[in-house]
Image: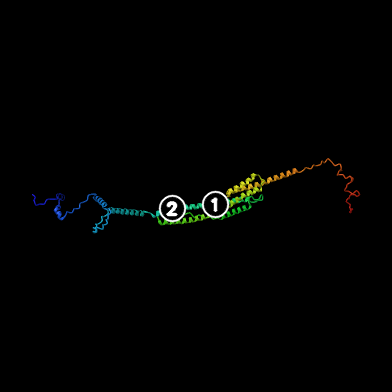
Amino acid sequence: MSSSNEMPDLDLPARAVGDSPRTDPLLEALVGRPREESRPHAEGADAVRLVNLVDSAVVNSSPSVIFVSSQKNKKPKKHRGHRRIDWVNTIVGAVAVVVVAATAVFTGVQVASADPASDAVEVLAADEASLAGAENSLAASTARLEESIATGLKDSELVRAALAELAATADHVETADPAALAAAVQAVDAYRTALDQATVPPVPASYERGAVDEDSLTSVADAINKVQEASTIVDEASDELRTARTAIEALNTAYTGQLAAFAGSLTAYATTQNDAFPVAGQEFRDAVTTAAAAVAATPLTGTSATSVLKTFRDAVLALREEDLRVRVIEEQEREQSQNNQQPVTPTPDPGETDPGTTDPGTDPGTDPGVDPGTDPGTEPNDGGGLFEG
């Protein structure tokens, strides 16, 4: 039986759970609640706690609001406790640090695994390809310039021969204006002399790589330097070739202009010839005019110059010959016409004689039997003379 002086049990459930004497309310009131023993966490408990911790940090991470105290309230401010840690920003920063560290490690691995010699070989191949293109372009341009000079010499030789056909010969006078023809011949001769003296820069030797250790950065670098040096030489040769080509082009321009001036002079010369030989038929006069226009419209180069200049010369010669032929015919007709217009004197009949005249062959005062050349009182000389035998 329980005594009536016993205190009532106020915390029966606590006793049932804790089953400890320190669960007595009075004892707890004196010495405090018992310290909870650490219990092993169940699987996943840390993750749950971390989530709860993050959620709590999100709720309490809002910026603090500062209120300005009123003038009426001059009480000292209550000391603020320590600011709560922003665990979200802390965790994000930690993750960023980890990512940066991982990226640096990955980049370091790439740099460490990269092969500088292999990269240098790629640069070398690119430089060599560029150099090869420049060498091919230089060789083609040099060949074109040399061909241009050879063609100019060949064509000018034909033009020189065609101009010589327009000069005066033993058979006919010149078939072009003498002064213009002399200037054209001088221009051709000067042009040919300049072409003979023209110098085409030589093409540098082609680049060859040689032996290169592609696994050695130093060896590849030396090869790249050689390519750069070869490229510089090709650039300098290209500049020299460009200068030579410019000089040849200027020479061609001047020469073409001089020949064009001569071609224009033939138009005026054709008019002079038509005026000088007006007796020839109109078709001959038109042929000369047409031939002069063809010369003016055709570049005087090569076979084309030979053809048009020969046609003009032949047209002028034909005009002159036709004019002469017509003049001869007209002169003959004129003389014949004059002969036909003179009076005709009748010829006397030899059977009729004048009765008042005698036969002129007989002298009536002489003896027909006597030789009139002999004196009748003398004898003919028998050859005795003063010397008789």
Residue 141 seen from this side? yes
How far apart marks 2 and 1 lie (CA) works out to: 33 Å
- Percent across and percent down for residue 80 are 24, 57
Binning the other alpha carbons within 10 Å of mark 1 as few (below 14), some (14 to 19) or many (20 upward) gives: some
- Percent across and percent down for residue 213 are 41, 55
Q: Amino acid at mark 1?
A: Ser
Front residue of 72/236: it is 72
Which residue is depicted at the point 53% across and 54% down? 246
Front residue of 301/220: it is 301
Q: Amino acid at mark 2?
A: Ala
Which residue is depicted at the point 65% across and 48% down? 275
Front residue of 39/124: it is 39
Residue 201 seen from this side? no
Which residue is depicted at the point 45% across and 56% down? 228
Residue on which disc 2 sits: 126
Taking 119 as reference, is 48 left or right?
left
Please tell me the numbered disc located at residue 148. Answer: 1
Please tell me the numbered disc located at residue 361. Answer: none
